[in-house]
Amino acid sequence: MKDLMQSVELGVSQRKGVNVTGPKVWLKNEVVRVGLAESLCTYVMMVFGLGSVAQVVTGQGAFGEYLSINLGFGLGVAMGVHVGGKVSGAHMNAAVSLTMCTFGRLAWKMLPVYVFAQLLGSFLAAGTIYAVYYEAIYDYCGGNLTVTGVKATAGIFATYPAPYLSLLAGFIDQVFGTNKPAAAGSEPVAVGLLVLLIGISLGSNSGYAINPTRDIAPRVFTAIAGWGSDVFRAGNGWWWVPLAAPPIGGVLGAGLYKALVEMHHPPLSEQGEGLLKEETAPLRKQENICANVCV
């Protein structure tokens, strides 16, 4: 509808002899535009995701349950993709960005831009939720900010393993949870549903971080905001697992897809006019928008 209205206005203006120009572009540097979009995508995802956790925890079950958190992160991812997916590809996850670079769909020089943007968006989102739920958090825990225990609140912002989970099992959990092909300009609903599915099926062990930047930035925020260094000591030093395991899982997942699916696809130009004409393109053909913008 927006495009239709613009076309009508353009036609009317041309008939009236008015010189019509396109909207002014304030930022012409593609790298900056991509970084800002990626920060906003990540911020949107994290605000909705962390907000859902804060509401469940501080409401003590009165305002939602575990499924509410799954839905919050799933819909948050969908909204993040919707907001800036056409500009940055909405990775919102350093594991996805690394996988894109590994398989040649994103220039390596863009990896630091994406990682920094994701860290910034996640950190700001943690600060936002802390401010919004400040009184609720202090009312819930009585002003005692703890990482573990009955009234622990650090888990609102970062992930921590269940008491029974070893570091090795947690590492495998995170690798497997991230073991999927990297999203390539995917539709918001499909990506959101995928995150929802992972949360429903693989979330109980350690909170399904499956995202290094989603976990470490809020963890650093909580260390600064009053939870202290316990955020790094808890869970036998769990903090490094969400950093190291998801990138491995992302690369493995995309590699499996390439080996089991993509390599057996004929090039699109060789596909016939039959039922396969509308089939989804292979991984290497589904270039992320940023592969064109940033290479």
Image: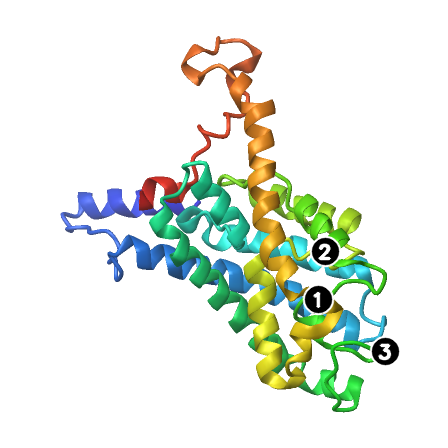
Residue 196 versus residue 255: which sits nearer the camera? 255
For the point 56% across and 36% down, the residue is 254
Coordinates of residue 268 in the picture (x, y in percent): 44, 17
For the point 73% across and 88% down, the residue is 138
Q: Quick check: marks 1 and 2 in contact, CB under 8 Å? A: yes
Q: Earlier in the sequence, mark 3 or mark 2?
A: 2
Q: Quadrant of residue 12?
A: top left
Quadrant, the C terminus: top left
Residue at the disc numbered 1: 52
Residue at the disc numbered 2: 71
Tell me the amino acid under the disc marked 3: Val
Q: CA distance from mark 1 to mark 3?
A: 19 Å
Badge 2 crowding class, 10 Å Cα cut-off, few under 14, some 14 to 19, many 20 or more, is many
Badge 3 crowding class, 10 Å Cα cut-off, few under 14, some 14 to 19, many 20 or more, is few
Q: Quadrant of residue 37?
A: bottom left
| In this rendering, position of residue 226 left or right of residue 151 | left
Residue at disc 3, secondary structure: loop
Coordinates of residue 140 in the picture (x, y in percent): 79, 84
Q: Earlier in the sequence, mark 1 or mark 3?
A: 1
